[in-house]
Image (cartoon, rainbow, N blue to C red):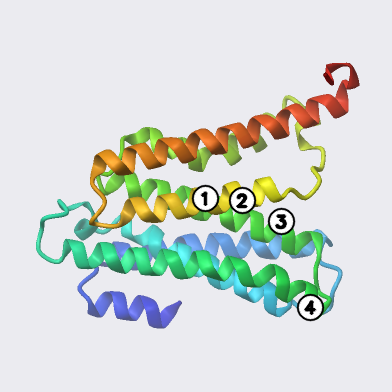
Amino acid sequence: MVPALAAALSAGFGAAYVAMALLWFVAGALLVRHGLRRGTHPHARFGGANRVTLLRLALACLLVGLLFEAAWSQPMAAEGRAGLAWGVVALATLTALLDAADGPLARRSGLASAFGARFDMETDAAFILVLCALVWQAGQTGPWVLAAGLLRYAFVAAARPWPWLAAPLAPSFRRQTVCVVQITSLIICLAPIVPPALATALAAASLALLSLSFAIDIRTLAQARHPSLET
């Protein structure tokens, strides 16, 4: 994290970039520490898989810093803007690819846990929200794209007045696939060769797919609470 921030400063990024990237990483690390104290990670070691997820969190925080960097809000035709955009695409792609490593690594090492699964899921959710904000700030879509990043948090918030929404859900290939599609679509939208009209259509389609996935999960939880809703 520190070498990456040093490189960003040498590239001409402002102090706000460093401050925000560090602030969000520290906040994330504190949440990880809180999760460990809840006892959902029963192993003596933190584990390589969780380290990979922590690395993904750090990379996502590097992307967060761009939201406060003036160079990112400049028009795509501005000098150096396309190069920056491709750098963001590369960093986001690396972050996404690492997501394929932590789960298998946890299972192979025998260190899989409820903590690790939740850590991975929340990192994915935060990463999607950051990508949504970057796509919007890049002028590729309107602010409605943030809905894709906020759906997860709205779902969690809704579980307070409706606790049945907090019931556990079985692992789902459909859910994993939709997450991959959402992340991939947003990264594509950030590419400077993708025109805003195409980015808008792609983001809208992936948002519709994500919304459908959440609707299926909500219906599943509702049926578990009220079996009479089954058809």
Q: Are marks 4 and 2 in contact (CB under 8 Å)?
A: no
Within 10 Å of disc 4 (Cα), the crowding (few <14, some 14-19, many 20+) is few
Amino acid under disc 4 = Arg
Residue at 46%, 55% in the rendered image: 184
Q: What residue is pinned by disc 2?
A: 177
Q: Could you tell me how far apart the alpha carbons at marks 2 and 1 are, in whole angstroms?
A: 6 Å
Distance between the alpha carbons at the discs numbered 4 and 2: 22 Å
- Above or below residue 146? Residue 162 is above
- Quarter residue 167 falls in: top right
Sooner in the amino-acid sequence: mark 4 or mark 2: 4
Determine which quarter of the picture holds residue 51: bottom right
The residue carrying pointer 3 sits among few (fewer than 14), some (14 to 19) or many (20 or more) residues within 10 Å by Cα, namely some
* Comes first in the chain, label 2 or label 3: 3
Q: CA distance from mark 2 to mark 3?
A: 17 Å
What is the quadrant of the C terminus in the image?
top right
Q: Nearer the viewer, residue 15 or 231?
A: 231
Q: Residue 108: which numbered mark, if any? A: 4
Of circles 3 and 4, the one toward us is 4
| Secondary structure under the numbered disc 4 in the rendered image | helix
Q: Nearer the viewer, residue 53 or 82?
A: 82
Per the model, the C-alpha gap separating discs 1 and 4 is 26 Å
Horizontal and vertical percent position of residue 106:
75, 73
Q: Residue drawn at (52%, 39%), measured in percent from left and top?
A: 150
| 117 sits left or right of 67 in the view | right
- The residue carrying mark 3 is 118
**Res. 33 in view:** yes
Which of the two marks, 4 or 2, is nearer to us in this view?
2
Q: Quadrant of residue 13?
A: bottom left
Location of mark 1 (residue): 181
